[in-house]
Amino acid sequence: MVSTPRLQIEDEETIAHARNKMVREQARAAGLLGSAKDARVSGRVSATLIEAAKQRAHVASDTELLEIALSRLALEDDFGVKLLRRKGAIAPSVDLEF
């Protein structure tokens, strides 16, 4: 097993917490999160998947994991789609070499 330096783990956790906070703030600003929790999500997924996601996001509860995951999905931009739509949009005569 490869050991990871403690400082790196603490940095990853700090970054994950900051990212989670920013996602929540953006979701709240977009009107996606508020004081009312008026819906319930239920499904069956692998316990291994849930634990891996919790570790990656540095969260403890299923609710927090779902809230962050759904917020990230809802706020995801469509950069990739827009980029692919531009395929062939640059004239072949344009010199892109450095």
Image (cartoon, grey):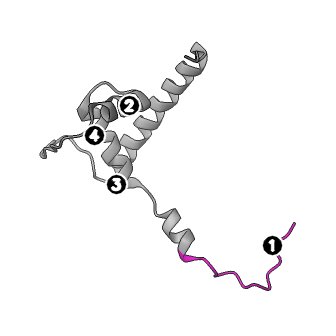
Where residue 1 sits: x, y (%)? 55, 16
* Magenta stretch holds residue 69: no
Q: Is there CB contact under 8 Å for labels 3 and 2?
A: no
Q: Of circles 2 and 4, which is in front?
A: 2
Count of picture labels: 4
Q: Is residue 91 magenta?
A: yes
Kindly identify which numbered label has been placed on residue 66: 4
How far is mark 2 from mark 1, CA to CA? 42 Å
Q: Are marks 4 and 3 in contact (CB under 8 Å)?
A: no
Q: Earlier in the sequence, mark 4 or mark 1?
A: 4
Cα distance between the residues tagged 4 and 1: 43 Å
**Residue lying farthest to the right in this orientation:** 98
Say which of marks 3 and 2 sits in front.
2
Q: Is residue 28 visible?
A: no
Q: Amino acid at mark 4?
A: Leu
The span shown in magenta is 85-98
Tell me the amino acid under the disc marked 3: Ala
Give neighbour class at mark 1: few <14, some 14-19, many 20+ (Cα, 10 Å). Answer: few
Question: Alpha-carbon distance for marks 4 and 3?
Answer: 12 Å
Residue drawn at x 43%, y 31% as measured from the top left: 56
Find residue 52 and name its label. Answer: 2
Instruction: Please determine whether, in this image, residue 77 is positioned above or below residue 45.
Output: below
Residue identifier under label 3: 74
